[in-house]
Amino acid sequence: MKVLRKSEIIRLRQVEHVNAERHILSRIRHPFVVDLFATFQDSLNIYMLMSYVPGGELFTHLRRAHKFTPDVTRFYLANIILALIYLHSFNIIYRDLKPENLLLDPCGYLRLTDFGFAKVVDDRTWTLCGTPEYLAPEIIQSEGHGKAADWWACGILCYEMLVGYPPFFDETPYGIYDKILKGNVHWPRNMDRLSKELIQAFLHPDRSERLGNMIGGPKDILEHPWFRGVDWGALERREIKAPIIPHTTSLDDTRHFLHLPFPSLHDMPGLLMEEVWPLPHQRFQFPEF
């Protein structure tokens, strides 16, 4: 259950993003995307009932392993590519790809989650949003961006899975942006040639020359030599054994997630106390929920 406090949504000016997330998730179904079953609201919160994915974040498994082998990276990057191809077929750009937004199901397959920055775009959009380390140059430079920005993020994620950290990092967002625009990537000596070529193709600064965004479209990705041997149909049918099988003992197992202190009564979702009932002018309504 995703619970969002209405007053915080208003304060942070996230109404459009929340409505977009609900709209997008309600119209899509894919084995590598989290399912939305229902949405509702009360006077304090809005609620999104979603499929529970108990295997934890890919981020957790990556940090535990420090880095992934090319075979493990290939499996999970292929999951993501199929999910993005599906989203792009509806003109949906995701815009927030990162290990924290990728959940492992009990079989070890990925589920894309957190669609707060996703948007239906026919051509381009100009909103600056996303995680700094994963932003494409055209987003930083406010040139307008589209599906190609998601393929750039695939290159960043591929590098991070293989190396253990993203190719562009700094202490401040502006430092990260500067490094992205300069495009200087440190290539480990032990990185194989095909992996480097794939990442470079995703990280092409010219979006018209970027892998996945050229005249061949996503077919160029599926046919890239780095993915040789991948049975894309079998993968989408979930017929291939995943390289990481999370240990879970029940459908509600939470061992792979951070356990936080139980919230106070005041912070609990729903109307549990008379004194937390909002004043009339605070009772925001979200018509789509």
Image: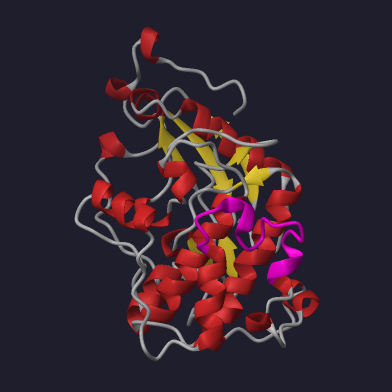
Which residue lies at the image location 44% right of the left edge and 67% below the top edge? Answer: 57
Which residue lies at the image location 36% right of the left edge and 69% below the top edge? Answer: 185
In x, y percent, where is residue 260?
27, 57
Relative horizontal placement of residue 179, taking residue 109 as reference (left or right) = left
Q: Choose top left, top right, bottom left or bottom right for residue 225.
A: bottom right
Q: Does the magenta stretch include residue 193?
A: no
Residue 225 visible, this orientation: yes
In x, y percent, where is residue 54?
50, 68
Residue 53 in the image: above or below residue 195: above
Relative horizontal placement of residue 253, taking residue 112 as reference (left or right) = left
Magenta region, residue range: 203-221
Please identify the quadrant where the C terminus is shown. Answer: top right
Residue 22 in the image: above or below residue 289: below
Residue at the extreme bottom:
190
Name the one closer to the observer, 70 or 280: 70
In x, y percent, where is residue 287?
60, 20
Relative horizontal placement of residue 134, taking residue 117 as reference (left or right) = left
